[in-house]
Amino acid sequence: MRAAPATQGRCITNAHLPHAVSRLRAARLARSVKPFLARGGSRVERCPGCRVPVSHCLCALRPSVPTRAGVCLLMTDIEPLKPSNTGWLIADMVADTFAFGWARTFVDPALLALLTDPQWQPYVVFPGEFVAPERVVTDVVPVEGKRPLFVLLDATWPEARKMFRKSPYLNHLPVLSLAPEQLSRYKLRRSRRDDHFCTSEVGALCLELAGESLAAQTLEAYLDVFTHHYLQAKNQLPVDLDDAAHQRLRGGGQSTP
Ligand SMILES: [Zn+2]
């Protein structure tokens, strides 16, 4: 079984309907021959809503920010099963999040329908240095009557390269390459030392480029809150609901003085 067709792919935030990544996870689990054991803590009961151990559930903190932009996640087979996958966080917040399992030999007709749906202007998000220069864009220019749809390859870097190379249906799409200045500004703001950005961080950068700053900042704060709950659960420590990240999330992603 694959993800539902694009027309049914809409997730209504906070409406307790399983979103696109959740449905992809359920479909993937249904196909499993043996149970998937999350690394470490496989015996811990995890909340189906946020994948964090129930003692550290953050479902009540799920943000709701309307966005014009949509996100299409192409996920490797195992990705929706990982409790640490952050594409899930995008699906929690961005109502029009679509998720598809990626395979070299199969493409979901619903994905092709989504990519040709005239309401969307799709961009494949990928580093420009690996792409023919004429395909590369670094800005999201509004297109009359269309909403931006960010296609994110939700995978490890070697897998993402392979997905990019072996998905001919992406070849005609513009490639949105996050500019080094934007990345370094982001790294500074987030005190990041390495070049690895997780999927929800890339999603936040895309929302920012689309002019949706509130959504971008909220998604960043939500990632920080998720990371805090996830790590505190792992270390069997209580959550701090008043730390900076929680405050930023409550403040709609804005930093509080
Ligand atoms: Zn939960």
Image: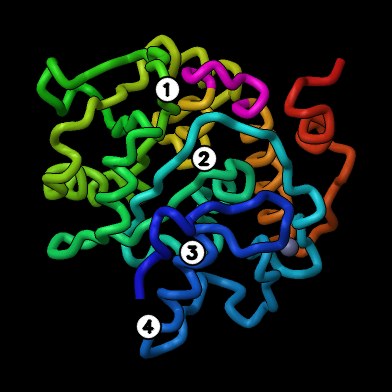
* SS at circle 4: helix
Amino acid at pointer 3: Lys
- Indicate which disc, 1 or 2, sits on the residue closer to the N terminus: 1
Amino acid at pointer 2: Ser
Q: What residue sits right under mark 1 in the picture?
A: 145
Q: What residue sits right under mark 2 in the picture?
A: 200
Amino acid at pointer 1: Gly
Q: How many marks?
A: 4
* SS at circle 1: loop
Q: Select label 4 or label 3 by which is in front.
A: 4
In screen coordinates, is 64 left or right of 6?
right
The front one of 81 and 150 is 150
Q: Residue at x 44, y 83 (%)?
A: 30
Residues marked 1 and 4 touching at CB (< 8 Å): no
- Indicate which disc, 1 or 3, sits on the residue closer to the N terminus: 3
Crowding around mark 4 (Cα neighbors within 10 Å: few <14, some 14 to 19, many 20+) is: few
Tell me the quadrant of the picture where the C terminus can be found: top right
Q: What residue sits right under mark 3 in the picture?
A: 82
